[in-house]
Amino acid sequence: MNKFADLHIHTYYSDGTFSPEEVVQAAVRVGLACISITDHDTVEGIGPTRQAATDVNVEVISGIELSSEINGKDVHVLGYCINEKHPALVDTIQKAQTSRVERIHTMIEKLKQMGVDNIQFEEVSQLTQSKSLGRPHLATILKQKGWVADISEAFTKYLGEGCPAYVPKYKLTPYEAIALIRKIGGVAVLAHPMITNRDELIHRLVESGLQGLEVYYPNCPAVTCEYYAKLAKKYNLIMTGGSDAHGKAKDNTFIGKTRIPYEYVEQLKKLSRVT
């Protein structure tokens, strides 16, 4: 019997809406053998997901999606099979989350100056189970309060880069993110390169220790996946993939929508230095 994995899933510990229990239940429903929790700049969802999967036949691979930036462009780096308790990771997460909290406070103040004066920090922070706050949380409150019609409008009107309430967050460079993942024993993979659209960086990222490409991603035409599969082969990178599911926060994807053969998980394990 063939086994499949979804290696890009978010929980309510970052900007997803599903609890670890709901994630595991969804994985069981669609017949996944393996999942990875890759919350943004936090690993708090991994332990509860493992606990929730104890009595079902679903393997949970540790993961994280690190925010990074170069030349003003977001470049997310996935880390797999990581030591989530490594001091270097704990320190980086603490800095990132402190910055995220400060960022939300500042954006709320900017919104108030624009007349959007009925949003409280506590309302935003209640949308996640950690301090890994992000713009989607604030966008959700803007929608709930009637300031925008949907999440997309919140970004185009207020929160997107160059918009009046935008505030940059603490970010590593992608090279620093790769170095950190390698330091903590994990496997560094470039997230959704077809969305990031910075293929010219891949060569330098490989030279800096990049080990994989997220080749398989939801709602992408087959020709796009084939293109990145060829790039992965060119640079001797492993291929990964996943749904990038965020629960109800993303209505165009769901857990298991994109799945990959379990052999890719085995390749990740071989590259990892975490035992």
Image (tube, rainbow, N blue to C red):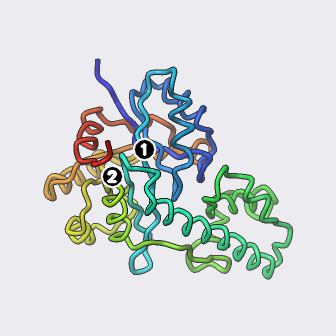
Residue 25 lies, in percent from the top left, at 56, 27
The N terminus lies in quadrant: top left
- In the image, is 84 to the left or to the right of 136? left
Residue 199 lies, in percent from the top left, at 28, 67
Q: Are marks 1 and 2 in contact (CB under 8 Å)?
A: yes
Q: Residue at x 30, y 38 (%)?
A: 265
154 in relation to 49, above or below: below
- In the image, is 161 to the left or to the right of 137? left
Residue 156 lies, in percent from the top left, at 61, 70
Q: CA distance from mark 1 to mark 2?
A: 9 Å
244 in relation to 163, above or below: above
Residue linked to disc 1: 62
The amino acid marked with disc number 1 is Ser
Q: Earlier in the sequence, mark 1 or mark 2?
A: 1
Q: Most extreme residue toward the right, as rendered?
A: 118
- In the image, is 263 to the left or to the right of 61? left
Name the one closer to the observer, 252 or 118. 118
Q: Is residue 140 visible?
A: yes
Residue 251 lies, in percent from the top left, at 58, 44
Helix, strand or loop for disc 1? strand
149 in relation to 168, above or below: above
